[in-house]
């Protein structure tokens, strides 16, 4: 069975109600989480959190607005690559990196893992890759975070083998098996938040865990179907799809088939 290790690579701050309708106007910290997924035959990173590259590419110009809207707090000691080294993992110990989507707080550490194979949604990448300027900023994409050889390292989930899921994971019925993971790491589409937004189903000793990325920002989102402030809809890729995904997480939670973990859940 697979093992999960969580990391926090910096955090941003925002008003609580932007993440959860009715949560209030007070400012909350939202950690940028990443996970190490260790299966019997491989080790994959799920996202990267923030990194110094994010600060470098949002220090001035148009993309400085990114940090003004969501102030970022990051120290060099928070870098995922550094935290992994401190735990004894060398670059050659990693099999690949899986990106849930292309927002800056999920891809900022890409340049810290040179040569590492990457997995993402092909549809999401095609909708994102050419965005520049305001079109990129509106979608939370910072082009400077993408390494020059990124596309040469990519594999798309659409090319992976589709596998049926057990009834306990309803309403999800099929997923894409990550090659070499022996069925312990499966990828599912969780559309709405961003282009190509995906989640990872990980089979651990304790049962299935769904890494749901930004499909919600609080457990109350899927437990009680309380979405974010309507103002947040302005930055969603597809609002109806977002709420449909929230309903799917609600059903999964009610069925008890998987533990749901979110990338940015904070104390609201």
Image (spheres, grey):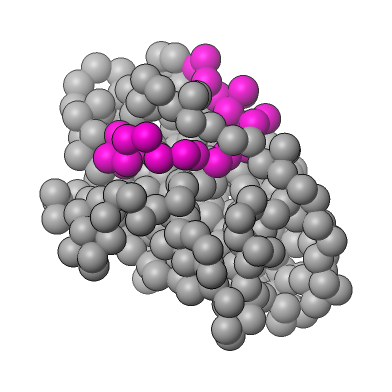
Which range of residues does the magenta coloring cover?
A: 108-131
**Location of residue 121 (image quadrant):** top right
Residue 26 higher or lower than 122, as above or below: below
Q: Residue at x 30, y 18 (%)?
A: 62
Tally the numbered discs: 0
- For the N terminus, the quadrant is bottom right
Find residue 17 and report its horizontal and vertical position in percent. Answer: 46, 57
Q: Nearer the viewer, residue 27 or 148?
A: 148
Does the magenta segment cover residue 121?
Answer: yes
Tell me, yes or no, whether the highlighted magenta stretch contains residue 166.
Answer: no
Residue 98 % position (x, y) = 51, 47
Residue 96 seen anywhere in this rendered image of the structure = yes
Relative image position of residue 54 (x, y in whole percent) = 27, 35
- Res 68 seen here: no
What residue occupies the far left of the structure in this picture?
A: 76
Horizontally, residue 56 falls left or right of residue 257, namely: left
Point out the image quarter for the C terminus. Answer: bottom left
* Residue at image coords 82%, 72%: 166
* Residue found 61% across the figure and 55% down from its top: 180
In the foreground, 203 or 234 = 203
Q: To which quarter of the image does residue 155 belong? A: top right
Horizontal side, residue 213 vs residue 266: left or right: right
- The residue lying furthest to the bottom in this view is 206
Is 140 above or below relative to 85?
above
């Amino acid at each position: 069975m697979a093992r999960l290790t969580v990391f926090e690579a910096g955090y941003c701050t925002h008003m609580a109600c932007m993440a959860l309708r009715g949560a209030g106007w007070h400012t909350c910290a939202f950690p940028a989480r990443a996970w190490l997924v260790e299966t019997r035959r491989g080790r994959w990173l799920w996202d990267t959190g923030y990194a110094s590259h994010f600060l470098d590419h949002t220090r001035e110009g148009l993309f400085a607005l990114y940090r003004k809207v969501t102030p970022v707090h990051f120290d060099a000691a928070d870098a995922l690559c550094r935290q992994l080294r401190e735990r004894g993992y060398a670059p050659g110990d990693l099999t690949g990196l899986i990106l849930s989507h292309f927002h800056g707080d999920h891809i900022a550490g890409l340049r810290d893992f040179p040569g590492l194979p990457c997995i993402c949604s092909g549809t999401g990448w095609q909708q994102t890759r050419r965005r520049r300027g305001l079109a990129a900023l509106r979608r939370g994409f910072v082009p400077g975070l993408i390494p020059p050889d990124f596309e040469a390292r990519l594999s798309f989930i659409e090319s992976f083998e589709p596998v049926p899921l057990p009834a306990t994971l309803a309403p999800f019925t099929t997923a894409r098996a990550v090659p070499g993971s022996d069925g312990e790491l499966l990828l599912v589409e969780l559309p709405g938040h961003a282009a190509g937004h995906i989640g990872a189903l990980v089979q651990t000793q304790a049962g299935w865990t769904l890494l749901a990325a930004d499909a919600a920002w609080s457990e109350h989102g899927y437990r009680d179907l309380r979405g974010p402030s309507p103002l947040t809809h302005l930055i969603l890729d597809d609002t109806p799809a977002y709420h449909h995904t929230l309903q799917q997480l609600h059903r999964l939670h009610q069925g008890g088939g998987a533990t749901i973990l979110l990338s940015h859940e904070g104390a609201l």
